[in-house]
Image (tube, coloured by chain):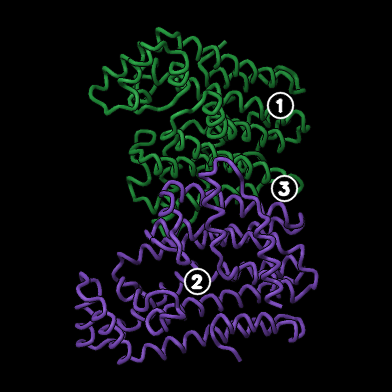
Chain colours: A purple, B green
Amino acid sequence: MQTDLSTLLNQALAELAYGQQPATLYDPIRYIMGLGGKRLRPLLTLLGGQLFTDELTPLVRPALATEVFHNFTLVHDDLMDQAPLRRGQPTVHEKWNASTAILSGDVMLVRAYELLVQHVPLALLPRVLQRFSQTAAEVCEGQQWDMNFETQDNVTIAQYLDMIRLKTAVLLGFALELGAVLAGALAADAEHLRQFGTGIGLAFQLRDDLLDVYGDEATFGKRVGGDIIADKKTFLLLTAQAQASPAQQATLGRYVGQPLADADAKVRAVRGIYDELHVRPQTEALINEHFEAALHHLARVAVPAGRKQPLEHLARQLLDRES
Amino acid sequence: MQTDLSTLLNQALAELAYGQQPATLYDPIRYIMGLGGKRLRPLLTLLGGQLFTDELTPLVRPALATEVFHNFTLVHDDLMDQAPLRRGQPTVHEKWNASTAILSGDVMLVRAYELLVQHVPLALLPRVLQRFSQTAAEVCEGQQWDMNFETQDNVTIAQYLDMIRLKTAVLLGFALELGAVLAGALAADAEHLRQFGTGIGLAFQLRDDLLDVYGDEATFGKRVGGDIIADKKTFLLLTAQAQASPAQQATLGRYVGQPLADADAKVRAVRGIYDELHVRPQTEALINEHFEAALHHLARVAVPAGRKQPLEHLARQLLDRES
């Protein structure tokens, strides 16, 4: 099922025309869109729609808007974060330059709107575009909070959770809501699906934070301990800082925010504090809480449980919680 | 008349809410939108609409979308061009930083769409958004060509004219078309207004190129000769290079694209070649050609000539061709 939908999405993606000239503007778009990835957001749109209809063809092109938008945020975020690699390949600003990353990203945002304008039925268009614009602004707000936090001393756990909600989760919520709306769902069902997506998104980002510290490098795909090395204020670090004894505070203070001498020693020391404070099970409990809350919203969508099975399956896959 | 409309626009601009938190995202938007300027694009929308209706209130908020979009392009272009000043004040990336300029600009593009989605009647929305998206992509294409030309050796005059059409003129065309469409104009009239705006835009940009060389520093507001010093491939330089004798080519070659020794000497030498080749009257002739073509399109709009007077007056003002 999911494989069929992924094939459908990848065919439609391959047919998307972004523009031709100047090639220096449009080649980077084809490049980043061609780097692959799970196509999670449009997949969520189709799976959300599938709760209410079997005719998914009209949903495919609007669904791609969320993928184009997501890749626009990757291009601009990678530039702001000075990231050299994306999916193991050079980022757009590395392969071309900063100006190209800015401008090609801008056009991608325009093309995302265009996909919705061209392929969403008129009666649904204002609502869809209104929700898309709100989501797009929230994603930018999340990225700005994330950058603010780099130089902000007193980030609270609540602020951190709100940041990842904006930066990551709301777009998953919108992708699901879009599928529901396009498939003719009632407003209450579309809202439950949006909240399901937001909850999954929060759980997914927290799991990413956890894997960065406790993951298996081979399957995680990034260097384990990268967040610790970069002093990233994740849920794990903020929790440890909030709960540390004076001695543990001192240990953290010797490494966090200090010039990096020995990366492995830093990762070992900070992870040691996490272990002492049981940060891992606390994070797992919060992941579980958001995951269960999300499932609760899915349960309240007024369609037979059997139709929800693919969506629940994907959520469990994403969070590595196969039932 | 124009004063009344400007007051109307500035009041509505002052009431626009872009967002509050994080302030590091939204303060830069209020800053750039507050730097003033002629508000030319929304003014064109209102003057375009006024040909067909006396009830301009419903046009004001959609009109602001073109101003927000224009300022988005200024924020991103200034960053790409590393410009320190905009309207005599620090640019957003100078006052904050590059990341803020990227992200605040992104949100401005979202807010421009939002203004149209919220304030354009449903029946007109797909057409307006389709044309806006096309225009937005074209403006990005124009900026990319402009950057490409900096390192491209064989830029033709036709390529240059196409670049300024995309980068500057099409948005003026869209602003006028938007006014016509919102005021219920026939498609043929809206198209004539669009072409009027594009022609005025081309003439206006060529005039800017001319003033950069031959303008009065006090009224021009920028350093005269700036384009020559920066080796900017303007219509004037490309025309001179196309028409220069071997001796004149040699003179140009000693200055253009060479390390800058004496800025005043360079400006004098290049302007000397322009004078010898009569580049100024050639530029004036082309400005006039586009201006007359634009007026021809305005003349073909099927409303009484008296209604066109404010629009024609603004066009003449812009090009300093008061009749």
- The mark total stands at 3
The amino acid on which the numbered mark 3 sits, given as a three-letter code, is Pro
As drawn, the label of residue A44 is: none
Up the image or down, A37 lies above or below B224; here it is below
Identify which residue is drawn at 63% across, 59% down: A65
Q: Position of residue B136 (x, y in %)?
A: 58, 42
Up the image or down, B139 lies above or below B192; here it is below
**Residue under mark 2: which chain is it in?**
A
As drawn, the label of residue B126 is: 3
Left or right of B150 in this view: B179: right
**Residue under mark 1: which chain is it in?**
B
- In this view of the protein, which residue sits in the foreground, B23 or A37? A37
Residue designated by label 2 = A165
Identify which residue is drawn at 34% across, 23% down: B256
Q: Position of residue A92 (x, y in %)?
A: 46, 54
Residue designated by label 1 = B192
The amino acid on which the numbered mark 2 sits, given as a three-letter code, is Arg
Q: Position of residue B34 (x, y in %)?
A: 43, 41
Q: Name the secondary structure under disc 3.
A: helix
